[in-house]
Amino acid sequence: METAMIKTPLGFTEIIGDENGISKIHVFDEEQKVSKKIPLELEEAVNQIQDYFEGNRNDFNFKLNPKGTAFQQKVWQELLNIPHGKTMSYQELSIKLGDVKAIRAVANANGKNPLWIVVPCHRVIGSDGSLTGYAGGLWRKKWLLDHENPVKQQSLF
């Protein structure tokens, strides 16, 4: 496995993967040493993540290889269907997955998402519209949602 550390507006981000795809993307609160050289296998992921933060990318198309249970994989796959700039409630996600009563299991799988930002677990909110349950911190979730759906100032004239 190769590793790269980059600095983003939300903290230092570690990207781990190999020729089979990216298996983990994680953000740190504390300062980390930024990679001087990015391994070839991670270059595309690094470039796309940087483009995302610069506002030049809405989705990602590098190869993913997250590790998880079959259920977690199913939830993460469904998260990929939430469009950029949109949100979905945990209940809506559970219904899409075929079991309205699986809200807690869906929320748990969502919280174990190993591919920060790329598998957009930040787009899942409470049924009442509240920003609930985000492993990276609710301030990051709010930042990401604002980044993806900025309020446009109306012209006064």
Image (tube, rainbow, N blue to C red):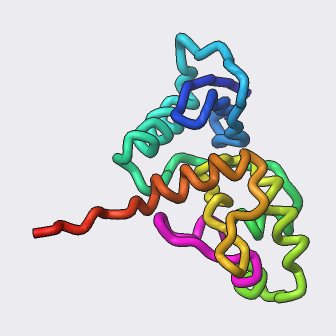
- Residue 143 on image: x %, y %: 55, 50
Measuring 34% from the left and 47% from the top, which residue is drawn there?
56
Image coordinates of residue 71 in percent, x first then y, are: 85, 68
- Residue 111 in the magenta stretch? The answer is no
- The residue sitting at 58% across, 72% down in the picture is 87
Q: Is residue 90 left or right of residue 142?
A: right
Quadrant, the C terminus: bottom left
Q: Give the range drawn in magenta.
A: 78-92
Going by the image, does 126 lie left or right of 39?
right
Q: Quadrant of the N terminus?
A: top right
User: Is residue 126 rendered to the left or right of residue 152?
Assistant: right
Inspect the magenta stretch and tell me whether residue 86 lies in it. Answer: yes
In which image quadrant can residue 122 be found? bottom right
User: What residue is at 85 percent from the left and 54 percent from the top?
Assistant: 68
For image coordinates 72% across by 74% down, the residue present is 126
* Image quadrant in which you'd find residue 12: top right
Task: Judge by depth and name the residue closer to the eye, 101 or 67.
Answer: 101
Q: Which percent across, then down, holds residue 98?
A: 79, 88
Above or below, 78 against 2 in this view is below
Between 72 and 91, the residue placed more toward the observer is 91
